[in-house]
Amino acid sequence: MSALEVDGITVRFAGVTALDGVSFTVAPRAIHAVIGPNGAGKSTLFNVLSGAYRPARGSVRFRDVDLTHRAPYEITALGVARTFQNIALSGAATVEENLVLGRHHLTRAGFTGTALRLPHVRREERRHRARVREIADFLGLTEVLHAPAGRLPYGDQKRVEVARALCVEPELLLLDEPAAGMNAHESALMAHLIRDIRDALGIPILLVEHDMGLVMGIADRITVLDFGVRIADGTPDEVRRDPAVQRAYLGTEGES
């Protein structure tokens, strides 16, 4: 069984092929990493999975639902949440306000009810804020809930982004370089956090990451891209030993 099936995805931009027939599957409850050098097509792949790009060929299926031609908001509503390589928080808003935004698609109150602050609207808001506090506690953010997100240390802001994605109540979590810009200590904390999310929620996690120590330490399976083509797919040990991967990304053993 697989939670996510990527089948033959091809993406072209003005005659340049960014992805060329890329296929792989993500198993339920797996931490699956996509790696490759800069320009390999990793970000393009994530934009296809989240609905920002539409492929020229191929398909994406999540739990037997075709995502290929769905809009981003439809994919989010189906339980797919993502973070971004560059922090995309509202810096002036509090951490709590940023997390509440992640639950927007779950809100049932209409414009009139919200404007009039009707009782059912207030009850729904209390439920959402209670869930936000639970998620913040899980990620160790309780003490900064009322702080402006933009004033937090970089590592904390990255955790807020993950927390906002969890506020979507995802069935599949896409993490775009969650450890980018972090020091070794922060990266280790992020690795533990990713494992904790998978273990606690039982959901598959697909991540793009350049930190090879993090990837090799937590991934169940790794897909390797180079110039838009899949050159390897396997366990960390299999990928580590693959000559094509060593040449393209890890560096061939014995090279100076």
Image (cartoon, rainbow, N blue to C red):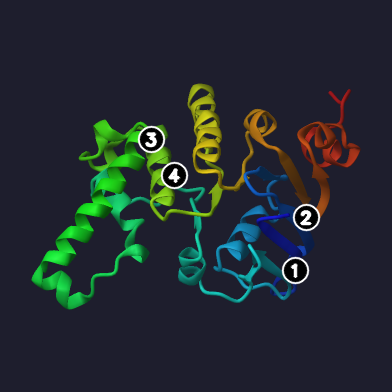
| Secondary structure of residue under mark 4 | helix
Q: Position of residue 44 (x, y in %)?
A: 64, 60
Among numbered discs 2 and 1, the one appearing first in the sequence: 1
First of labels 3, 2 by sequence position: 3
Horizontal relation, residue 194 to residue 157: left or right: right
- Reading the image, the residue beneath label 1 is 10
- Cβ–Cβ below 8 Å for labels 1 and 4? no
- Residue 117 pos. (x, y %): 10, 67
Find residue 218 and report its image quarter: top right
Separation (CA) of disc 4 from disc 2: 28 Å
User: Residue 47, located in which quarter of the rendered image?
Assistant: bottom right
- Indicate whether 14 appears above or below 32: below
Mark 3 vs mark 4, CA separation in Å: 11 Å
Q: Determine whether the residue tagged by mark 1 lies in a helix, strand or loop.
A: strand
Q: Which mark is residue 138?
A: 3
In three-dimensional space, the C-alpha distance between marks 1 and 4, rounded to whole angstroms, equals 28 Å
Measured in 3D between alpha carbons, the distance from the residue under mark 2 to the one under mark 1, in whole angstroms, is 12 Å
Quadrant assignment for the C terminus: top right
> x and y percent of residue 205 in the render?
59, 46
Dot 1 amino acid type: Thr
